Structure formats: C-alpha cells, structure tokens
Amino acid sequence: MVKIKPAFGIYVHWPFCARKCPYCDFNSHVQDTINHDQWLKAYLSELRYYANNMPDRVVTSVFFGGGTPSLMKPQVIGEILTEIDRLWNCSEDLEITAEANPSSSETPLFQDFRQAGINRLSVGVQSFNDQALHFLGRLHNAADARQAIETAAKFFDRLSFDLIYALPDQTPANWRSELSEALKLAVDHVSLYQLTIEPGTAFHKDRIAAANEDIGGALFEITQELLDQAGMPAYEISNHARKSQECRHNLVYWRGQDYLGIGPGAHGRLTRDDNTDMIQNVREPGKWLELARSKGLGQQKRTPLTSEERRNEIILMSLRLSEGLSSEHYRRLTNSDLALSLDQSRLQALENEGFITFQDNILKAAPAGRQRLNAVISHLLS
Ligand code: SF4
C-alpha cells in the first residue's frame, strides 16, 4: 500500500492568455495591458492573509496555473516564492511547478523561470501535428513545440507536457503513430486529455462533435498500452509518470489533502479541528484584483463542507487515482469507516460489472471502470 505523507499545496492562478483557445473553458482571458506590479501586490496580500490564518502548515508544493503563467514576469514569480518561503515552513523537497506554453516568445524565458525558483515545468503542447494545432486554435506550431520541450529539458529535470486526443476524425492508427512519436520527447511525465466540448466555448457554439464513446474507448486503450510500454503508467485517469515523478501538487487534490488557492477563481480546502472549509475566490480577474488590493483577500465564499460532502468528495477524487483509496487514509481524513460510507448494494453491483474493486481495504476503479469513471462514480455516490 502507498504510504501517504502529509502534504499542503499552494495554487496560484494567473488568468491571462495571449489568445483564447476554442475548446477552453478555464478562467482565462485576453487583456492588452496588465500591471504586473498590481498583480504581485494582490497575490502577496492573499498569501499574507492565509499565513496569519494558518501559519503552522508545511508547504510541500506550489503550482502556478492558468491561463498562461509563463506570461508572468519571472521576477513576479520569484517574489511570490520568496514570500511563501518567508511566511511558512517549506519542505526540503518543495515541488514548484509552472504551466508554460511553447510559443516562441515564452520558450526563451524558461531559463529565467528556473532561476526564479520553478523546478518543474508543464508545457501545454497539445499536439505535435500542425493540422491539429491549427484546429485547436493554438499560437504555436509543431516545430515550436519540439523546440520548447528540448529547451525546457536543458533547465528542468522534472518536465511534463500535455496532449489532447480524440479530435474529430482522429483514427486509432493516427493516434498510435502521433503518440509514439511524442513519447520520444517525454522526460518523466505526460498528461493526456480527450477533447471534450464544454458549454460556453467556441467549439460548443460551432457544434463541433466530440469523439463517440467507441472511438474514445479505443484511443484510451492505445494510450494506456503505449504509456505502459514507455514506463510511464497512468497514476491518474489522464496523467502518466515514471516512478516517483507524479505531480505531487495534483496528488494533493486527488488524495483529499489541504490546499490554498490564490488568485481569481482559485479554490481551496482548509481543515481545522476535523472540519474542512471549501473556499472559492471571485472569478472575474478585475474584481478579484480590486478586492485583493482593497481588502487583502479576493474571496467569494468560505463554507464548511458537511461530513457527507467531504466523504463524497474524497471518494470521487481518489477513484481517479490508480492507487485508489485505502480505508486507512479515508479514516485519517474523515474519522469514518470507508465500508460503512458506501451503499453496499450499489458497490456490489459495480463490483459484479467489473467496474470497481474493494479488496484488502482499498477501493479502486478497475480498468473497465476507468473508461467510464464519471458514470461509475455517479452511480456509486447517488
Ligand atoms: S492557453 Fe490554455 S488556458 Fe489559455 S485559452 Fe488556451 S487552453 Fe485555455
């Protein structure tokens, strides 16, 4: 059984991008001028508020996400990291990740990001195929993507890239060949997402159709096969890594541990005296900036989770992980018994279908269940 260490992550959201991608429903915006000094002061204000609120945590990971945090000035990143180090104790092996895009203007800054303190880079490649990149509305081409990975590998020992698959008309043979080529550039981690068409996106307005379930299933199978062969099995439904190179920050979410969210739309989970609060920041960047500057905090709401909400959230998140959820970890987080928290007839039905296993006190999604995880979880928790 995996021994889960205590962890506490800090997420910093940078909400700006050079262009809005047509499939993207993240809190990302295009804005001509950005006052980096004002944004820095606002981030520092929120950090100081939470450090007063909970000074006794040991920070194990920091994650700059977005949006496109590689558009942040490296010195802004450096000052945020200096402040985190001043406000809290940090673990010796603190993981500091930034998401980056492979555009020709961002790649030359990778060395500066490393010098600012980033020690793990996650590059939004999405595809090494020019046609697919054009369809996805990306600003980079395949040559930029290769260049970005090669440059990043010079400065970062820990390096991930994202790909999107299950594009319209993508065949299993295309995907097998594209993924095999891409894996030649992989270092220790890759994230592989199926294209989904989310409401509010340009693809949704244009009625672009997602891959059907059969094709999606076949592509998922190929993904697992090639990544297993490459020595980077799935540790989460869309994330693959060499041993011990999992993204420790994202594991915090999936293992139901505490984290802080800084910046517009960021959210957090903070536990004190066995009660966990759900924290949600104001989503709109201008409003968050104004609040954080005037009040020191851009929070929209802070609500205690009921014990049922907390238990369900832990089960839902943990089932994404290949390690699953142990009764011991569940008890540590919730003070309750995992077997007694589950509806036995629903669990039994899912076990009989081969979608879930609950053996040796570990609840896990079986391979067939991982392909239809949302349906399995909603049946288990309904
Ligand atoms: S770069 Fe990333 S965050 Fe920005 S619009 Fe594209 S997908 Fe969304």
Image (cartoon, rainbow, N blue to C red):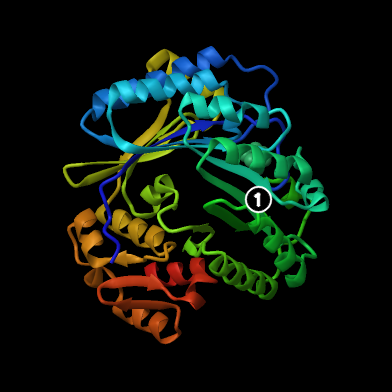
Q: Position of residue 319 (x, y in %)?
A: 40, 65
Task: Give the labeled residue for mark 1.
Answer: 199
Q: Is residue 146 left or right of residue 372?
A: right
Q: Position of residue 353 (x, y in %)?
A: 45, 85
135 shown above or below 214: above
Q: Residues within 10 Å of mark 1 (few under 14, many from 20)?
A: few
273 shown above or below 75: below
Is there any visible trace of residue 24 in the rendered image? no
Name the residue rendered at 22%, 45% in the picture. 275
Across the whole image, how many numbered discs are drawn on residues?
A: 1
Name the residue nearer the viewer: 78 or 279: 78
Q: Is residue 88 left or right of residue 378?
A: left
Q: Position of residue 321 (x, y in %)?
A: 42, 62
Name the residue rendered at 61%, 35% in the picture. 28
Is there any visible trace of residue 347 in the rendered image? yes
Q: Quadrant of residue 216?
A: bottom right
The amino acid type of the residue labelled 1 equals Pro
Name the residue nearer the viewer: 209 or 368: 368
Query: Ligand 1 shows up in which quadrant of the image?
Result: top right
User: Which residue is situated farthest in the front direction here?
Assistant: 154
* Secondary structure state at the residue bearing disc 1: loop
Q: Position of residue 372 (x, y in %)?
A: 53, 71
54 shown above or below 314: above
Name the residue rendered at 45%, 67% in the picture. 378
Name the residue rendered at 42%, 38% in the picture. 267
30 shown above or below 268: above
Q: Is residue 354 left or right of residue 124?
A: left
| Location of the N terminus (image quadrant) | bottom left
Ligand 1 near label 1 (Cβ, under 8 Å)? no
User: Which residue is situated farthest in the bottom direction here?
Assistant: 352
| Location of the C terminus (image quadrant) | bottom left
